[in-house]
Every structure is written in C-alpha cells, then in structure tokens.
Amino acid sequence: DFQTREEAKVSPLARNIFRIRGVTGVFLGSDFLSVTLEEEDAWLTTQAEVFTAINEFYDEGKPILEDHSAMPNDAGTTILETDSSTVCLIKDLVETKIRPTVQEDGGDIAYRGFENGIVRVELKGSCVGCPSSSVTLQQGVQNVLMHYVPEVMGVEEIGPDSKDDASGGSDSSGGGAEQVVDASQVDRLKELGF
C-alpha cells in the first residue's frame, strides 16, 4: 500500500503510476491493483494513462518489487504458537472468508488484534476513505466473525499508524479508530463487566 512517491520507490510499477498527475496512492494486491486519485471524478480522464503505465511496465519485464523483503505480507493472519484458539479462528476467517471478498472491490483488510471481545482491523487500498467501509465492517466483517466466533462482540477499524500486536493483545490507543458494536451485543458486554 503506497501512499507517497517515496514509499513507491521499491516498486517500478507503483513509481510508473505515481508519475501520473493526480495519483495519491497505489495499492498492489496479490492479483489486482487499486489507484487512488485526488479527485474521484478524474478517473475517466486518468484511466487511459494508468493502463498505459501498467502496459509499459509489463513490456519492460521488470519485477513488481525490486526488493521483495521490503514489502512483507502484512495481513496479520499468520497463525502464531502463542495465539489462542479464538485468535486462530479469527485470523483464519479473515484470511479465507473476509479478505477475498474485500479484495474483489480493490481493497484489503488486515487483522490487527483481539481484546475484550473487539477485533481490530485495518482497511487498505480502495477501502480507505470509502463511504461504504462502515457498512462493510458492520454488515460484512462483523457479522461473519460474530457468526463463527461467539467471543467476538464487535469490530474496530484502526488506522495504519496504530501500534497494534497482531498476535492477539495490543495497546488499545489507536487514534482515529471507528468501533462498530452490534446493539444486540450490549447485554453481553454488560455481563462481562464492560
């Protein structure tokens, strides 16, 4: 997820796309990419330039990333020995059921922690700033997790600068976070002393 030209230095493809006027972000998924523009209405006039930049990149035969270690898989879904069975199940659901659906719309989602019944996630790509992201979190992500994992009582979106531990615990000081808790879960929260 490249949000600046500086970040895009490790990717010849992202660099090519950032040369186009109005591009403010490039997100490279496993089998797709998303381009964020300053002005949403500019896609019609920018689309041909983006496609040309992509085609020129592939014609040159360069790798997408110059240093693959510079961009680790940051989905936070790797199962660790220290993960509880609940966290393992949450990570598996994020990886196998939730991420593929979010990626279909040009975005991505990363697991960032689970504490006190709340799953913290980070939205990426076209999901960032999308007006539908709250609906995606509540009606999609939260409903799936609550259906399969009774311990889950809500989902909280955190920003990329939040320092969370994807192994399960975290510091809960995420600035700019939006928490989505289903109203039907309020009684469960009270029973647990929240």
Image (tube, rainbow, N blue to C red):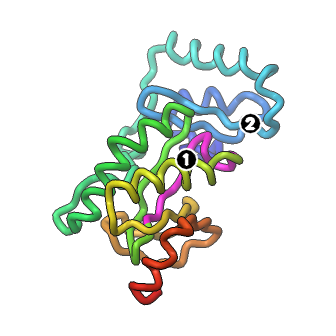
Residue 120 is a magenta residue: yes
Task: Judge from the rendering whether residue 108 lies leftward or rightward of residue 90; answer left or right.
Answer: right
Left or right of residue 47: residue 85: left
Front position in the image: 153 or 21:
153
Disc 1 versus disc 2: distance between alpha carbons?
15 Å
Residue located 68% across and 37% down the image: 36
**Is 137 inside the magenta-drawn segment?**
no
The residue stretch that appears in magenta = 119-130
Q: Nearer the viewer, residue 50 or 107?
A: 107
Residue 132 in the image, given as x and y percentages of width and height:
66, 46
Amino acid beneath label 1: Lys
| Proximity of marks 1 and 2: CB atoms separated by less than 8 Å | no
Q: Residue 184: where, in percent of width, then height?
A: 51, 68
Residue 161 seen anywhere in this rendered image of the structure = no
Relative placement, left or right, of 190 versus 94 is right
Q: Which residue is mark 1?
A: 124
Q: In the rendered structure, find residue 144 and report the number of the disc placed on it.
A: none
- Position of residue 24 measured from the top left corner of the image (x, y, whole percent): 71, 41
Query: In this view of the protein, which residue sits in the foreground, 10 or 175?
Result: 175
Q: Is residue 104 above or below residue 57?
A: below
**Residue 70 or 45: which is nearer the viewer?**
45
Q: Is residue 64 visible?
A: yes
For marks 1 and 2 on the same chain, the one whose residue lies earlier in the sequence = 2
Q: Residue pushed farthest left?
A: 81
Answer few, some or many: residues within 10 Å of disc 2's Cα (few below 14, many 20 plus, some between 14 and 19): some
Q: How many numbered discs?
A: 2
Residue at disc 1, secondary structure: strand
- SS assignment at label 2: strand
Location of mark 2 (residue): 37
